[in-house]
Image (cartoon, rainbow, N blue to C red):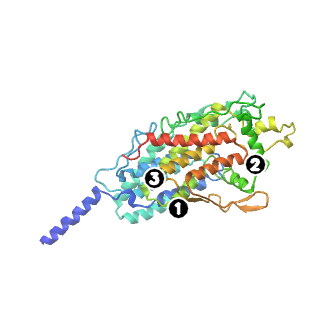
Amino acid sequence: MLLLAMASVIIFSCRKQTNSHPEQTKTYSSDVVKKWLGVQLPLLYSPAVSYGVNAGRYMAYCGVAAYESVVPGMPGYQSLYGQLNEMPQMPATEPGKAYHWPTCANAALAEMTRKLFTFNPATNDSVQKLEDELNGVYEKEIGDAAIFERSKAFGKAVAGQIFSWSATDHPWSSWPALVLTNNSPGLWWPENNNPTIANGLAYWGDTRTMVAGSIDNVTATPYAYNDTDPASPYYKDFKEIYDVSKSLTYDQKRLAKYYDDPAVNGYPSGASYIPVFKQILEQKNPALDIAVFAYAKTGMSLFDATIGSMKAKFHFMQERPFQFIRRVIEPSKDPATWWKPFIATPPHPDFPANHATFSGAFAQALTSIFGDHVSFINSTYKGQMVDLGTGPEDMGSYSYNSFYEFANAIAISRVYGGIHTRHAVEEGSKQGQKIAQNIDSKVKFRR
């Protein structure tokens, strides 16, 4: 009897200890994050309705929601409340109660995807399918209805707070369209000759950043305008684009097409960084704690880099290469003979280059987490066909030995594509890196 009583005490003590010190987030795989990224990617690819220049916005808010839904199980880490711009206080876990962190993350990411990805009619069905599938697995894995329901409720509550916060970041959505009035040489003017810039594009730079001050003092200036002196930095910058376009190599064409990010048969508006992030998680296979840390930090950096880039673009209003080349280097009054870039020019100014800024921030954030000299393969467009002049071929994959090597490839691809000057991509890369560094210095994930 005494032994039985002692055994009962031991069992009770063990159960009590488990409830007081639940399994840590790091003991779980990052499969839940990978699977939700897998649901989001088809929604972002070749969308029927444009979601604007905001793909980083989806990654940022989903990443923060995923992080906040499991950070109570991450000793040494802390909530981002009080650090991110106007972020509300997060729901609290119940003291002494156990939580299943993958279930928390599943509930949070299901709710965020359902509420954010409203531009795609396929969202609700795909969200419900994965949410139910994972809940079925986790409920059996847990074997305790109370823990399962508690975990679901916590994840959903976190997502509710994060989504409400996200809805207050874009006052530009109700602003009137910007109507351009100055078509002077050196200033950007749309290729379609329509001076009305709708859909809030011109005001994207006024979006609330994730981190206050992240885009302050990060922007260089364009070269001084000069269309008469071939030796001036400005003239040489645009002349290089023209010269490169006349002798593009196969490799340059392939790189330009790979990172074109078209709206049809592609991931537009910077969404291509999200499949790259998913591939990095799949290839490096971190535990759940590192995955959500990387998800939040990289998303925040990409989002704020988007805001910083667009703000600078519509401040400087620098012309695109096609304008300078058609006006100065190869003028023609016949549209049929106009110089054309290898890839289509996006409808916003040249300086700084968006993708150079995005990729600079993306690389800096990932390097700060996983380190430099990290090898990975980008197969985002493997299996997709493209004709580079010798017939259809598979776009294939690219291998990189660091995140910065990846970022540099994206930056120079815009020069090969004929849509950005070298100065715009080089300074854009620096701007993106500085934004991510600002975030790193201002936001403390670890205690």
Q: In screen coordinates, is 81 left or right of 386?
A: left
Is residue 215 visible to us here?
A: yes
For residue 342, the mark is: 2
Question: Residue 130: x, y in percent?
Answer: 51, 59
> Pointer 3: what residue?
292
**SS of the residue under disc 2:** loop
Q: In screen coordinates, is 349 left or right of 25?
A: right
**SS of the residue under disc 1:** helix
Mark nearer the N terminus (3 vs 1): 1
Q: Give, as a three-letter code, the residue at label 3.
A: Val
Task: Write the residue at 39% across / 65% down.
Answer: 141
> Pointer 1: what residue?
283
Q: Count the labels in the image.
A: 3
Task: Using the image as rendered, state which of residue 97 and residue 192 is in the foreground.
Answer: 192
**Which corner quadrant of the image does residue 314 belong to?**
top right
**SS of the residue under disc 3:** helix
